[in-house]
Image (tube, rainbow, N blue to C red):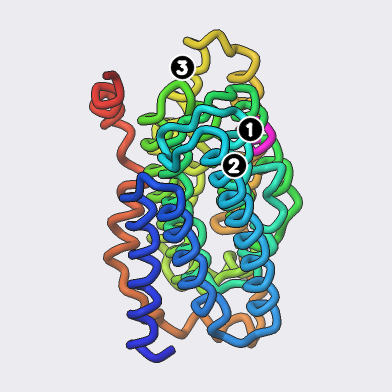
Amino acid sequence: MNPYILAILLFGLGLGTTITFASSHWLLAWMGLEMNTLAIIPLMAQHHHPRAVEATTKYFLTQATAAAMLLFASVTNAWLSGQWDIQQMTHPLPTTIITLALALKIGLAPVHAWLPEVLQGLDLTVGLILSTWQKLAPFALILQINPTNSTILIILGLTSTLIGGWGGLNQTQLRKILAYSSIAHLGWMILVLQFSPSLTLLTLLTYFVMTFSTFLVFKLNKATTINTLATSWTKAPVLTSLTPLILLSLGGLPPLTGFMPKWLILQELAKQDLALTATVAALSALLSLYFYLRLSYAMTLTMSPNNLSGTTPWRLSSSQSTLPLAISTAMAICLLPLAPAATALLTP
């Protein structure tokens, strides 16, 4: 892609998110979300592969549907209450519709079906943008409207953690596994949203760090299926020995970074007398852990079939810059000791 066009599209992505962040009026927020969608579409379809074009079309249709729902709900809210302010959502009907529209935008279950299919059709770089940056603007709006209907949030959260765990069990494609991992993590964030918005933000940030690291590892190894991970020993032995730690951090095992948000969320849910919800969420984390362990096993304990076509990629060194990968890997593994500082910041 022409670097000037790429720069304009990336600028559009940044501007769309910033407009949504800065807006207090529903029309402006909607405009930012639309800019976001329109800026990423050429990036998604840039390879002109039929799968990429299909994924782009699916993405466009779901995002357009969500944006139309959002606009409809905000107009309804203006009609019922006479104001367009995001933080003054008083009527339950538009609030619920907007919550569902934003859930569709970020891919929460049960409106998640587009996310694995879309992510599977993209290359890893655009997939990374879709899994991280594109979640920011809708999340800013969800945090601002602070939905009052707690039942719908808990249902969205629990179905997302369960479907995110179950859906990934039988997958062999890495991008689909990462999509289901994304759904499960978003479920955890939505579960605790009404009790501690700052904890949701902390979970979102740690998820970004771990996902960034995982995508960069797969990109360095040029891996898109579980089987191609087995060749990574010969390409980058040190990275391959660290990758299981990143994956287990995504699964939420102590003493890794990913344990911190899960631990704090379960603690918060227990404080709110939601012991059953906390138990279901913790058990659904085991489902996710299974496929992270499967990836770790494939990467570190299996050997790739050593034929001529298999040895070729081992000899090609990657041109990818390794500094972002090194920083994000260190953060994805080592940040648990900062948990006391995080809890101190979270408590008002």
Badge number at residue 169: none
Q: Position of residue 88 (x, y in %)?
A: 43, 32
- Circle 3 crowding by C-alpha within 10 Å: few under 14, some 14–19, many from 20: some
* Residue 250 painted magenta: no
Secondary-structure class at tag 3 = helix
Q: In this picture, is 307 found above or below 38?
A: below
Q: What secondary structure is the stretch in magenta mostly built from? A: helix
| Residue 79 lies in quadrant | top right
Q: Are marks 2 and 1 in contact (CB under 8 Å)?
A: yes
- Circle 2 crowding by C-alpha within 10 Å: few under 14, some 14–19, many from 20: some
| Residue 287 lies in quadrant | top right
Give whichever of 161, 69 is nearer the camera: 69
Q: Residue at x 69, y 58 (%)?
A: 114
- Circle 1 crowding by C-alpha within 10 Å: few under 14, some 14–19, many from 20: some
Q: Is residue 234 left or right of residue 18?
A: right
- Can you identify the residue that label 2 sits on? 76
Q: Earlier in the sequence, mark 1 or mark 3?
A: 1
- Can you identify the residue that label 3 sits on? 267
Q: Amino acid at mark 1?
A: Leu
Q: Is residue 227 visible?
A: no
- Can you identify the residue that label 1 sits on? 93
